[in-house]
Image (cartoon, rainbow, N blue to C red):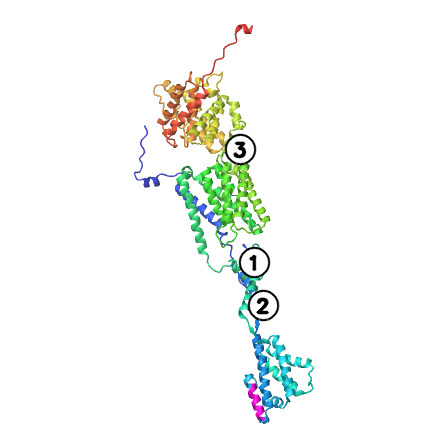
């Protein structure tokens, strides 16, 4: 009798004293999450913060620096706007009232002068004084020489009239052209040119000419006023007419070995490519965001994917597929530097969706598609000053979901291509809807290019999935439904070997496979895995086929001639022999496990009881020596194959397999195994065992149903 184990009473102490298997260790799992989180973070960081350079004006550039984005060159654009504004001519408004007032002033002045010089009561001196006063009143801040005044008071009335008319005409003509403060002197000089071009009646009289010149020059005044509002309006219009000067994505800012100019440095500064200040807040912000995504993924797996949560090997598989998909998308993102701005629609998100659907399950795949679509929004963001570009993320989400649904229930590898085509159609429709709904700038050529990338995404995902799937299955020893279907092909070398060398075992395995598949599906387990596992579970019998009763057709039973101990050794070795053969042919681990676990640690009763009957005096027969070495079934499918294996052999031994006898036999076998503890290490419940028994009985009744006995042909007819 085995001694009871002494276990620590404290759960905490028990957890630390009991050595954990690395495949189920929570510490290893946290380490895997940390590694994935760091890799995820590093793949995204360059897409929210471009590479920066330590460079100064006048230094030689060690790199060829290319603009990672298309961005307005604000400084160059502003300089161009300012230059355009400077080119606008200053606007003036001519005030005609100033002209008319000035002409009236001239007329009034000459009228007063006429009165003075024709007044007989005034001496020449008084006339000069009075005329000077008149000029002072009408021409503020203007001075006239004594010679001018003397000449003016000595002219005749006729000459005075001539002077007035000529002065009036010249001043009117010049003022009508507009006089500004900036060209006042130039306009006054125009008086001389006008006098030279005119033929005056008294042009030979220098007094008239000089007086006209003197008064006309003094009478030219500013009559065009600067219009600040109009000028500003035109300058603003000129600025608006200047198009934004871009720094184009892919544009070489500085070439390697080139001296950095002030203009180049300014562009690098605008693009955020200079190491001038710390960007720790960006790094920290992304770290928080990635942590949130990983935490939500962890909670989902722990809460809804219990099998996956307890198996670190599956976690490694999941993270490997996610990173493989992210790396593939990052490689596609390189195309954005080649001016393929919409290449984000080519993101092969379907690669991750299809691999996870095939290797794990579709529910987990859909959750991971959300994670990957968020990553797509970051990896293909057109403007690195924004974190997300949702047009790519939304299309990726549609494509990923379509890939997962398109591959559910896949029966052959060509189904992967079908899933890729479904994803292509979904991407195309999503892209068209994006162009119709959102204000996306672009031509018909851009739309066609985007649709082409969308179609390519589904096809690329399918091709990559087909390419990577065999390697992933080999490395992780996993079984996808497609691989299981390939292994179920009767032409597989091992199944051919089983059929040729052990035909009885082969047919037994086929029936066990049918029983196992139906039983597994009745409790929601993997029916396909159970069926294919049953095909290979007795492969070890090919090593010594004659020692197994189903292969002893018309032969003597060799066990009748050897000891029970030797018989036991031969029979018990067949699971181990089968595993070795499966390893030799590189059959996936789950099928090896079924072969190793289908007998668990059950007792080989026939030879044990035979040994007891032949026991000699003093000889010790230990029950443990006649038990299979195990291990016990570790998962439901292995336990089901073990039950069906035992049931099929037992039912065949019944002389009359009636439904009631079959039912009793099935229940007894399951009850015996349950009491023997064969289900202690797998998570089968009593309810599931009842469902398994019911399914096995229904299937067996279909196999062993009563048939009509055909009568012999009547003797008369034969004759």
Dot label at residue 413 = none
> What is the magenta segment's predominant secondary structure?
helix
Image spot of residue 264 (x, y percent)? 56, 61
Task: Please tell me whether mark 2 sits on a helix, a strand or a loop.
Answer: loop
Residue located 35% across and 26% down the image: 675
Q: Nearer the viewer, residue 697 or 622?
A: 697
Q: Is residue 301 left or right of residue 399?
A: left
Per the rendered image, the range of residues in magenta is 125-135
Of the image marks 2 and 1, the number of the one nearer the N terminus: 2
- Front label number (2 vs 3): 2
Q: Nearer the viewer, residue 457 or 677?
A: 457
Q: Are marks 2 and 1 in contact (CB under 8 Å)?
A: no
Image spot of residue 697 (x, y percent)? 41, 23
Q: Are marks 2 and 3 in contact (CB under 8 Å)?
A: no
Of the image marks 3 and 1, the number of the one nearer the N terminus: 1
Vertical comparison of 553 with 599: above or below = above
| Residue 679 quadrant | top left
Cα gap from disc 2 to disc 1, whole angstroms = 24 Å
User: In the rendered image, which residue does mark 3 sit on?
Assistant: 412
User: In the rendered image, which residue does mark 1 sit on?
Assistant: 246
Vertical comparison of 232 with 7: above or below = below
- Residue 566 seen in this snapshot: no
Cα gap from disc 2 to disc 3, whole angstroms = 74 Å
């Amino acid at each position: 009798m085995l001694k009871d184990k002494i276990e620590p009473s404290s759960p905490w102490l028990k957890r630390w004293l009991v050595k954990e298997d690395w495949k189920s260790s929570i510490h290893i799992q946290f380490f895997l999450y940390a590694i994935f989180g760091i890799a995820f973070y590093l793949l995204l960081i360059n897409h929210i913060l471009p590479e920066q350079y330590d460079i100064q004006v006048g230094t030689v550039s060690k790199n060829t620096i290319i603009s990672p984005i298309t961005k307005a060159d604000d400084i160059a654009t502003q300089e161009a706007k300012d230059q355009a504004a400077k080119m606008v001519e200053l606007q003036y408004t001519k005030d005609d009232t100033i002209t008319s007032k000035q002409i009236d002033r001239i007329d009034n002045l000459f009228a007063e002068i006429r009165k003075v010089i024709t007044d007989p009561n005034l001496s020449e001196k008084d006339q000069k004084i009075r005329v000077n006063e008149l000029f002072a009143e009408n021409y503020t801040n203007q001075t006239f020489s004594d010679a001018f005044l003397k000449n003016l008071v000595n002219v005749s009335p006729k000459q005075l009239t001539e002077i007035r008319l000529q002065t009036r005409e010249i001043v009117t003509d010049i003022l009508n052209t507009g006089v500004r403060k900036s060209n006042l002197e130039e306009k006054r000089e125009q008086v001389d040119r006008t006098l030279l071009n005119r033929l005056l009646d008294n042009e030979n009289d220098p007094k008239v000419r000089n007086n006209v010149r003197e008064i006309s020059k003094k009478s030219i005044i500013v009559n065009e006023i600067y219009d600040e509002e109009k000028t500003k309006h035109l300058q603003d219009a000129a600025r608006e007419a200047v198009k934004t000067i871009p720094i184009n994505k892919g544009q070489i800012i500085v070439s390697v070995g080139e001296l950095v100019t002030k203009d180049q440095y300014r562009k690098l500064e605008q693009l955020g490519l200079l190491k001038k200040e710390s960007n720790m807040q960006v790094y920290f912000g992304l770290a928080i965001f990635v942590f949130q995504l990983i935490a939500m993924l962890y909670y989902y797996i722990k809460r809804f994917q219990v099998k996956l949560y307890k198996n670190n090997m599956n976690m490694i598989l999941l993270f490997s597929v996610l990173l493989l998909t992210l790396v593939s998308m990052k490689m596609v993102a390189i195309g954005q530097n080649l001016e393929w701005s919409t290449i984000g629609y080519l993101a092969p998100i379907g690669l991750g969706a299809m691999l996870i659907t095939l290797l794990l399950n579709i529910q987990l795949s859909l959750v991971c598609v959300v994670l990957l679509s968020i990553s797509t929004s970051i990896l293909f963001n057109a403007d690195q000053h924004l974190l997300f570009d949702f047009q790519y993320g939304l299309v990726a989400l549609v494509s990923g979901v379509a890939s997962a649904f398109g591959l559910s229930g896949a029966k052959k590898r060509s189904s992967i291509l079908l899933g890729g085509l479904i994803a292509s159609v979904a991407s195309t429709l999503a892209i068209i809807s994006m162009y119709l709904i959102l204000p996306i700038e672009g031509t018909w050529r851009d739309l066609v290019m985007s649709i082409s990338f969308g179609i390519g995404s589904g096809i690329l995902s399918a091709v990559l999935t087909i390419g990577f799937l065999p390697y992933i299955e080999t490395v992780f020893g996993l079984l996808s439904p497609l691989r299981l279907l390939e292994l179920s092909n009767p032409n597989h070398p091992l199944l051919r070997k089983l059929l040729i060398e052990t035909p009885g075992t082969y047919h037994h395995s086929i029936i066990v496979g049918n029983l196992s598949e139906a039983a597994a599906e009745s409790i929601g387990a993997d029916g396909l895995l159970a069926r294919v596992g049953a095909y290979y579970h007795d492969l070890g019998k090919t090593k010594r086929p004659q020692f197994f009763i189903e292969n002893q057709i018309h032969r003597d039973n060799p066990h009748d001639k050897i000891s029970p101990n030797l018989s036991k050794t031969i029979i018990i070795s067949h699971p181990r022999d089968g595993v070795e053969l499966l390893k030799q042919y590189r059959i996936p681990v789950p099928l090896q496990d079924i072969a190793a676990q289908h007998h668990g640690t059950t007792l080989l009763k026939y030879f044990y009881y035979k040994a007891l009957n032949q026991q000699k005096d003093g000889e010790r027969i230990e029950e443990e020596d006649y038990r299979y070495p195990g291990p016990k079934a570790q998962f439901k499918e292995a336990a089901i194959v073990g039950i069906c294996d035992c049931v099929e052999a037992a039912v065949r031994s019944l002389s009359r397999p009636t439904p009631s006898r079959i039912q009793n036999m099935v229940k007894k076998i399951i009850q015996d195994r349950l009491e023997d503890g064969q289900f202690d290490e797998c998570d089968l419940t009593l309810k599931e065992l009842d469902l398994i028994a019911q399914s096995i009985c229904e299937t067996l009744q279909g196999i062993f149903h009563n048939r009509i006995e055909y009568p012999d042909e009547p003797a008369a007819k034969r004759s």
